[in-house]
Amino acid sequence: MLRALALLAVLALMPGPAAAVGVPAGVPGMCEGTCPVPGSGITGFVPPVLVLRSGSTVAWQSMDIGHLNLEDAVGQPSDGCFDAFYTTGVDALVTFRVVDGGLVAEQDGVPKACASATAVGGAQVLTYYCRIHSFTMKGALVVVA
């Protein structure tokens, strides 16, 4: 479901007839700079799909207890692109960049390739989840070059 919602968001960003689809409900417009994503073990991530400009930083914020976000490698072990631990009052910051047609996540000054990202229409789509609350906390990033 999240991947489909992320793909609709990519379509809305493309010029021409695809743009007529419009951004799906629940998906905010393009974020640049620092992009906050509050999360809760009960309600999940708000928004569940974030569209951001390459070079922007996602700031995951806890609305309840500690969380550990990892990229979702679609049934495969995580490729180690990022592991964002955060708790109330302490955000996890990860900067995402589209580089040479792929996605790179930079956390604590260390860049790592996101092998599980999917290229769609000039953007990179990366799904992620909270390892502690995997049933309720799932999200997707659409990183636009």
Image (spheres, helix red, strand yellow):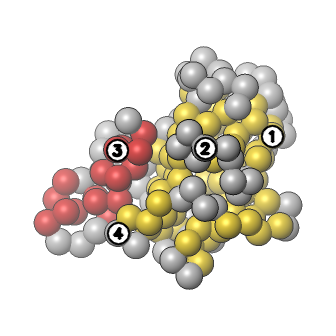
Distance of label 2 from label 1 (alpha carbons): 20 Å
The image position of residue 56, as x and y in percent, is 62, 65
The answer to whether any part of residue 12 appears in the image is: yes
Q: Badge 3: how crowded within 10 Å, few (<14), some, or many (20+)? A: few
Which residue is drawn at the image coordinates 49% and 38% (left, top)? 48
Please tell me whether mark 3 sits on a helix, a strand or a loop: helix
> Residue tagged by mark 1?
85
Q: Amino acid at mark 3?
A: Ala
- Quarter of the figure with the N terminus: top left
Camera-near label (1 vs 3) is 3
Q: In the rendered structure, which disc, 1 or 3, sits on the residue that comes first in sequence?
A: 3
Q: Which mark's residue is nearer the viewer, 4 or 2?
A: 2
Image depth: mark 3 or mark 2 in front: 2
The numbered disc on residue 121 is 4
Query: 67 above or below 111?
Result: above
Q: Which residue is mark 3?
A: 4
